[in-house]
Image (cartoon, rainbow, N blue to C red):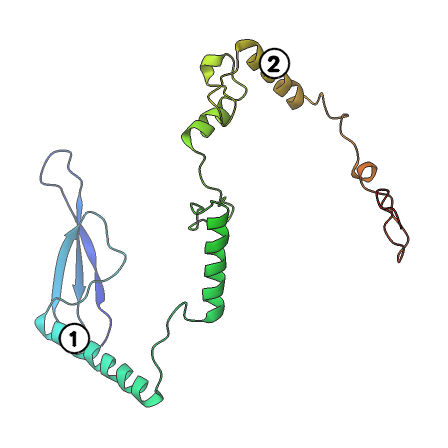
Amino acid sequence: MSEIAYQGYEVEQPEGFMEPKVYRVRWECPNCGHKWSKTFKAIPSEDPPCPSVKCAVARETSALAQQVANLTRMLLEQRAPATIGDKLAVKAIDETARIVMEDNQLTDLKDNIRRGESMAPKLPPAAQVAADNFFKKGAQAGARVLGTNKTLNVRQTNHMKTLGQRAIHGAFRNASVPPNVVLPKMRPVGQPTQNPGFVRR
C-alpha cells in the first residue's frame, strides 16, 4: 500500500476571543482516492491512516497475512521468536547484581539514568537536612551529629563553620603529605617484603 499523500493546510481563525488558531490539514489516499481533512491546534508530524472502510479492511487483511507468514516461517524453521534475557550469562549478571545490592542495602539504586547522572540513591530526609545544613550557623539550622539525635551547640557549629571556611580558602593545603612518604620504599624485583613484626623461628 502506498503512503498517504499530505495535501497541505489552512489556518482557521478561532471562534472565540483569545482562543488559539487552528490548522485544517488535508490528506489524500493514493490507494482508494479518498480525501479528508481534520483540524488541529498544531500540525501533526505524522500522517494518519486512511479512514475509509475499504482501506481499513485492506490494512487488516495485510496485517493478518503478515502474521500468517511469520507463523509459517517459524514452523518451517522450528524456531521460536527472539526473546530478551533468556541467555544464562544475562541471568547470571542480573542475579549477581541483585545479590550484591541486597547484601549492601542498595536495592534503591537508580537504574534508569542518562550519561553523567549518578546511580546513588537519595539520602534519607534526616541525613539530607544534616548534609545541607552542615556549615550553617546555629543549632536551629539543623546541624546534628549524623546517626544520632544529638544537636551541636552554637559554639560547636561556629567552630565547624570556621574550619569549613578555612578549608575552602586553602588553609590546610600544606598539611597533606605526598603518597610516597606513606607507602613503603620500593624494593628490588624478586626480594621478599620485609615484615618487622615477623620473627623467623
User: Residue 150 or 173: which is nearer the viewer?
Assistant: 150
Q: Is residue 140 left or right of residue 30?
A: right
Q: CA distance from mark 1 to mark 2?
A: 76 Å
Q: How many marks?
A: 2
Q: Is residue 163 left or right of residue 121?
A: right
Q: Residue at x 45, y 55 (%)?
A: 98
User: Which is more foreground, mark 1 or mark 2?
Assistant: 2
Q: Is residue 157 above or below residue 23?
A: above
Any mark on residue 159, and which? 2
Pointer 1 with pointer 2, Cβ within 8 A: no
Residue tagged by mark 1?
A: 60
Q: Position of residue 165 (x, y in %)?
A: 62, 18
- The residue at the far bottom in this view is 76
Any mark on residue 80, and which? none
Which badge, 1 or 2, comes first in the chain's sequence? 1
Q: Is residue 34 above or below residue 124?
A: below
Residue kind at label 1, given as amino acid type: Glu
Could you tell me which secondary element the residue under label 2 belongs to?
A: helix
**Residue 157: quarter of image:** top right
**Residue 177: quarter of image:** top right
Could you tell me which secondary element the residue under label 1 belongs to?
A: helix
Residue kind at label 2, given as amino acid type: His
Q: Residue at x 18, y 66 (%)?
A: 49
Q: Residue at x 80, y 37 (%)?
A: 182
